[in-house]
């Protein structure tokens, strides 16, 4: 699915794009209302993450245009305007959801998934690799159809890896998303999570392996044996 991020802060837009892409979505970016209008006019998106304080106006003014041009497109406002009246104004303008900055990355991606599920009541297809399957919406994990239970950090890691099998999930990004920083204690904690998840998948006969890209991160792939 394609998602448009409308955010003029380049650093934040880059971070948002990385977070959303890591969940398996394709991302386009716009830094102004004018640029967003041009992109939306030429291409459809499943959802737009929309800032309000943009260089050429309030993002809230774009919502009625989206509703007219792309009525099925979901709108999630992500803004520092956290006053209750501002939130009500955004929702009354036609936004489907409203999240304030600073935000929790996992809450953002959870809200994106929830909004996309409402498009037609459709559920995202399970991701399958080896004997393992992962349901993105429910976050259920199964091996040969039998559900398995994982600890929260193990499930978070597996979700990140399964959303882009064969592609490296950056170690620094995992540390930031899971713990908020990269101190030595959290590096050791991540190593433990990876070790536990590897052992659990092997015990279940999942037919997959977690590989380390030394000094970079981890990726999951079908077992060679």
Image: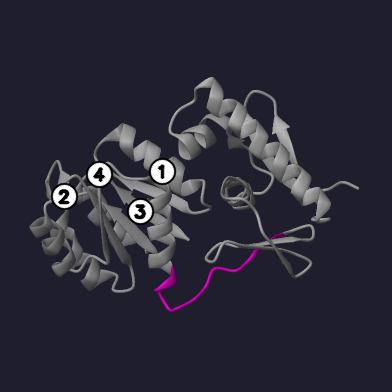
Side of 18 relative to 199 (left or right): left
Q: CA distance from mark 3 to mark 4?
A: 18 Å
Residue extending farthest to the left is: 85
- The spot of residue 93 in percent (x, y) is 14, 67
Point out the tag, 1 or 2, that comes first from the N-terminus: 1
Which SS class for mark 1?
A: helix
Quickly name the residue at label 2: 82
Mark 1 is surrounded, within 10 Å at the Cα level, by few (under 14), some (14 to 19) or many (20 or more) other residues, namely: some
Query: Do the numbered discs 3 and 4 sit on residues whose CB atoms are within 8 Å?
Result: no
**Res. 101 mark:** 4
Please state which of residues 33 and 186 is positioned toward the viewer in this rendering. Answer: 186
Side of 97 relative to 85 (left or right): right
Side of 49 relative to 93 (left or right): right
Quickly name the residue at label 1: 17
**Res. 8 mark:** none
143 is within the stretch colored magenta: no
Please state which of residues 78 and 26 is positioned toward the viewer in this rendering. Answer: 78
- Quadrant housing residue 138: bottom right
Q: Main secondary structure of the magenta part?
A: loop
Point out the tag, 3 or 2, that comes first from the N-terminus: 3
Residue extending farthest to the top is: 184
Mark 2 is surrounded, within 10 Å at the Cα level, by few (under 14), some (14 to 19) or many (20 or more) other residues, namely: some
- The spot of residue 32 in percent (x, y) is 21, 45
When the figure is inspected, residue 46 is found, relative to residue 202, above or below; the finding is below
Please provide the residue range marked out in magenta: 117-128
**Res. 4 mark:** 3
């Amino acid at each position: 699915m394609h998602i448009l991020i409308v955010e003029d802060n380049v650093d934040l837009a880059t971070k948002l794009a990385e977070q959303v892409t890591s969940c398996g979505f394709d991302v386009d970016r716009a830094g102004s209302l004018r640029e967003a209008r041009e992109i939306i006019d030429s291409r459809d998106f499943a959802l737009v993450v929309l800032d309000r304080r943009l260089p050429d106006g309030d993002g809230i003014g774009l919502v009625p245009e989206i509703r007219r041009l792309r009525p099925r497109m979901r709108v999630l406002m992500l803004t520092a305007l956290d006053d209750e009246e501002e939130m009500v104004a955004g929702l009354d303008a036609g936004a489907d959801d409203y999240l304030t900055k600073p935000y929790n990355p996992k809450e953002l991606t959870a809200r994106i998934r929830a909004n996309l599920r409402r498009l037609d009541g459709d559920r995202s297809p399970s991701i399958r690799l080896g004997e393992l399957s992962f349901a993105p919406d429910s976050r259920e994990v199964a091996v040969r159809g039998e559900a398995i239970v994982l600890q929260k950090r193990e499930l978070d890691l597996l979700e990140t890896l399964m959303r882009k099998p064969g592609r490296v999930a950056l170690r620094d990004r995992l540390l930031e998303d899971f713990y908020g920083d990269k101190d030595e204690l959290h590096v050791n904690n991540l190593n433990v999570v990876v070790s536990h998840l590897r052992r659990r998948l092997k015990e279940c006969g999942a037919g997959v392996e977690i590989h380390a890209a030394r000094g970079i991160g981890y990726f999951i792939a079908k077992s060679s044996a």
